[in-house]
Amino acid sequence: MSAAPGHRPGYVGDDGALLDVAEAVAADWAALGVRGSFLVRNLDTGERLGFDVQEPVPLASVVKVPLALVLLDRIATGDLDPARPVTVDPAASSVGPTGLAAFRYPATVAVGDLLQLMLSVSDNAAADALLDLVPVAEVDTRLRSWGCAGIRMRHRMNHMYECAAGAAGNDFSLALELAVRDEHTGRHTVGTLDPAHANTGSAAALVELLRRVWCDEISAPPATAELRRLMGLQVFTQRLASELRADSLRWSGKTGTFLHLRHEIGVVEADSGDRVAMAALTRADRRAGQAPDIDLAIGCAGREAFEALRR
């Protein structure tokens, strides 16, 4: 069953063969009950393929990439010390299954290590601790000053869980059911799934951000270099990276998962010199916390697009 009956994706592709790949990916996702946005771009030739690339989508933890860039920019300019210690108390920290968010006792961690936890294991508590130092409004303003108009940061990470609890109490399965139902109506019971109020981005805006980071065309070279390094440490490999594993390939990415959202963005670099940026932003039409077939479909899409765009 399609995630959005009657929806006709808007395709992009620089030739007929690339359009064919985009159409095949969209059909594969629809067969699994998935609607999404997908964009893949060769950073050197500019060739690209995808669909629905301008649609704003709630980003979940993918927003940690632009957040990290703003923080690294502050470090590069000397306004923030990466060695500065920050104490995180689990009694007042953010919800999440990894990193400091899963701790039971207070811990003191340096800013630079909070950044690594935020990107490598998607630690929500680390992200919100960093947002105590550089507030949400400042992050959003900085992104707009860089011309990243297609990416908005409007709230802390824990606000996603607060909104879900406000709609469904402690019943996460009910929150998931509401998210799936509301995808069809456009009226979002969980406020952080509403693109008008969520941390949002489009596939086009995210791929352009990756292009600028990999080409040192945003912030400062020390900040972009460190962001590339940190994204290369991500431990989750079940989506785009799953079909891009080879000694000759290097993947740097960031996943985002919340209720029915399953996302990933990143860049694959080959020993041949190819550099290809990707964004896969999906919403599933099923009430399941685990969906390995969807993760696999995202990985297959990334591999097919990469092969189509290699020089």
Image (cartoon, rainbow, N blue to C red):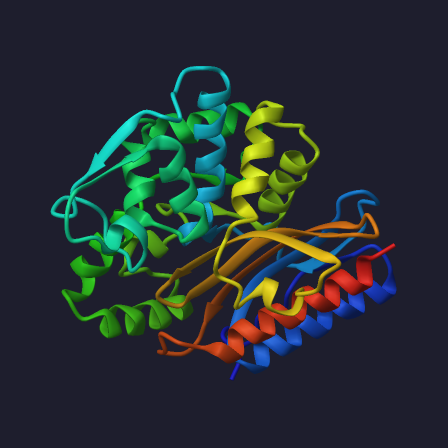
Give residue 87's quadrant in the image. top left
Give residue 9's quadrant in the image. bottom right
Q: Position of residue 284 (x, y in %)?
A: 45, 72
Judge by depth and name the residue closer to the eye, 193 or 227. Answer: 227
Q: Residue at x 62, y 25 (%)?
A: 221
Judge by depth and name the residue closer to the eye, 53 or 10. Answer: 53
Quadrant for the C terminus in the image: bottom right
Residue 71 visible in rendering:
yes
Q: Residue at x 24, y 60 (%)?
A: 164
Q: Residue at x 76, y 69 (%)?
A: 21
| Relative vertical location of residue 221 with respect to residue 87 in this rendering, above or below | above
Q: Position of residue 171 (x, y in %)?
A: 18, 71
Q: Residue at x 25, y 31 (%)?
A: 86
| Apparent side of residue 229 relative to residue 303 in the rendered image (left or right) | left
Total residue callouts: 0
Q: Residue furthest bottom?
A: 1
| Relative vertical location of residue 90 with respect to residue 30 in this rendering, above or below | above
Q: Residue furthest left?
A: 91
| Apparent side of residue 38 relative to residue 310 in the rendered image (left or right) | left
| Apparent side of residue 275 relative to residue 301 in the rendered image (left or right) | right
| Relative vertical location of residue 198 with respect to residue 187 in this rendering, above or below | above
Q: Position of residue 256 (x, y in %)?
A: 44, 56
Q: Position of residue 283 (x, y in %)?
A: 47, 66
Residue 156 visible in rendering:
no
Q: Residue furthest top?
A: 78
